[in-house]
Image (cartoon, rainbow, N blue to C red):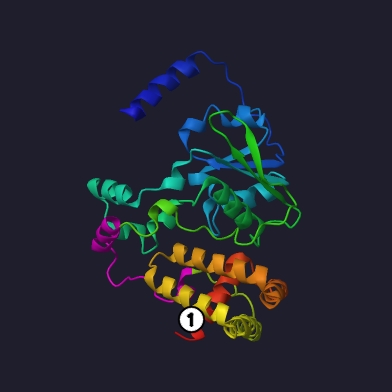
Amino acid sequence: MLFEAILERNRAFAAGRAAEPLPPPAQIGLAVVACLDPRLDGLLRPALGLEPGRALLIRTPGAGVRPESGALRSLGVAAYLLGLTEVVVVGHTSCRMASFDTATFIDTFRRRGVPREAFGSEDLRIWAGAIPDPKRGVLASVAAVAEAPFLPRDLRVGGLLLDDATGALEVVLRPGEALPAGAAVQPAPEAAAPENPAAERRAAEDRPAGSQARPPLAAAATSVTAAAPPAAKDAMLEAARSALRSLAATREWSDEIRRLRSELQRTRNPLARLALLEKFIGRAAARSQEVSDTLRRLKREGVGAGSRLGQGGLLELFSRALDEEGP
C-alpha cells in the first residue's frame, strides 16, 4: 500500500536526521498559482527561479482560480497573514484541463461506484476546472483574483504561460495591465462543444432528481450584481436593454441578434452559451459606439453600486436583456 510505503520511507528519513525546528513564520510577498499536474513538480520552481520558501505555491487543476474557490480563500489568508503583495498565475502548454474528456471522466467515476449526483447539478467541465486553452485559462484566473472583493486593492496580479517542453515563460498579462474583454468568462473547451452526446446521455442518467438545465441564458452566469440596490440593478439592466434595442434597429444587427438567439437555443452547455454572448458583445462593442459606451457605463455604475461588476456581470446583464427583449 502507498500509505505503508510512506511510513517506511519516513522512518528511514527521520533516523538519519537531527531535530531541526521550523524557523519563525516569515512574510512571503509572492504567491504562484500553477496547475496540479505532477509532471510539473521538478520544473516549476527552477523555471521561475524560486528557491523553496521564497513563494507560496498553490496548485489547482489548470491553474484555475474561480470565485468562491479554496484557492482564492488561500490567497486571502496569505494576503493578511503572510504579507502577500503579488500573485502570478502560471499555466502550461500541455495542460490536460484544456482537453477535458467529459465522457471518460463520467465513465471513470461511475466505474468506481460514484453516482453523477455526487457532483451536484453543475456542469462537469465547470466542476473539474476545465479550461478553453491554457492562455485563456490564465486570463480567467487573473480576472477572478483581480475581482475578488476580499483581496486588497494594492495586490498586483499577473499571468504567465510555461512552455513545459523548453521551460520558457511567455507573458500573458503583466501586473497592472488591463484585462481584455471577456477574460472572466471561461468558455467550454472546444473539444467538448458541441456537447458529447454519449457523455450527455450518461450524465443525464445520473443527474440529481429534479435538477435540469435552466434554459434562459441568464441562468448560466453567476449573479455578481446581487449586492447592488434594486434601483441600481434596474437601471443597469435597462441600459443593456437600450443598447440591444439600438442594435436591433438596424437590419445587419437585427439579423445578428436573431442568429445569436437561434444559436443559444441550440446550445445546452452554459459556458458555451456565455462564450457565444461574449463574442457577440465584443463584436458589437467594436462596431457600435453606443454599446461600447454602455459597457463602460455599466462597469462604472456597478462598482459604484457596490457590486464589483466584472466581465461576468456585464454578460449576465446582457443575457437577461436578450431573454427579455423578444424571442
Is any atom of residue 73 visible in this view? no
The residue wearing badge 1 is 323
**Amino acid tagged 1:** Asp
Q: Nearer the viewer, residue 62 or 114?
A: 62
Q: Where does residue 195 sit, x and y in percent of width and height? A: 35, 59
Residue situated in front as seen by the camera: 212 or 31: 212
* Magenta stretch bounds: 197-220
Q: Residue at x 35, y 57 (%)?
A: 119
Residue at the spot 46% in from the left edge and 69% down from the top edge: 220
Question: Residue at point 44% right, 22% down?
Answer: 10
Q: Residue furthest front?
A: 251
Q: Quadrant of the C terminus?
A: bottom left
At 62% from the left edge and 49% from the top edge, which residue is drawn?
Answer: 75
Element marked by disc 1: helix
Q: Please determine whether, in this image, residue 310 is positioned above or below residue 131.
A: below
**On the picture, is 219 further left or further right than 206?**
right
The answer to which of 82 and 19 lies nearer the viewer is 82
Is 48 magenta? The answer is: no
**Quarter of the view holding residue 188:** bottom left
In the rendered image, the vertical position of residue 88 relative to residue 207, given as above or below: above
Residue 124 in the image: state x and y as whole percent. Answer: 38, 56
Quadrant where the image shows the N terminus: top left
Q: Position of residue 209 (x, y in %)?
A: 27, 69
> Crowding at label 1, few (<14), some or many (≥20) Cα neighbours within 10 Å?
some
Q: Is residue 147 above or below residue 281?
A: above
User: Number of numbered discs present?
Assistant: 1
**Nearest the eye: 269 or 212:** 269
Image coordinates of residue 27 in percent, x first then y, are 72, 39
Left or right: residue 187 versus residue 299 is: left
Residue 216 falls within the magenta-colored stretch: yes
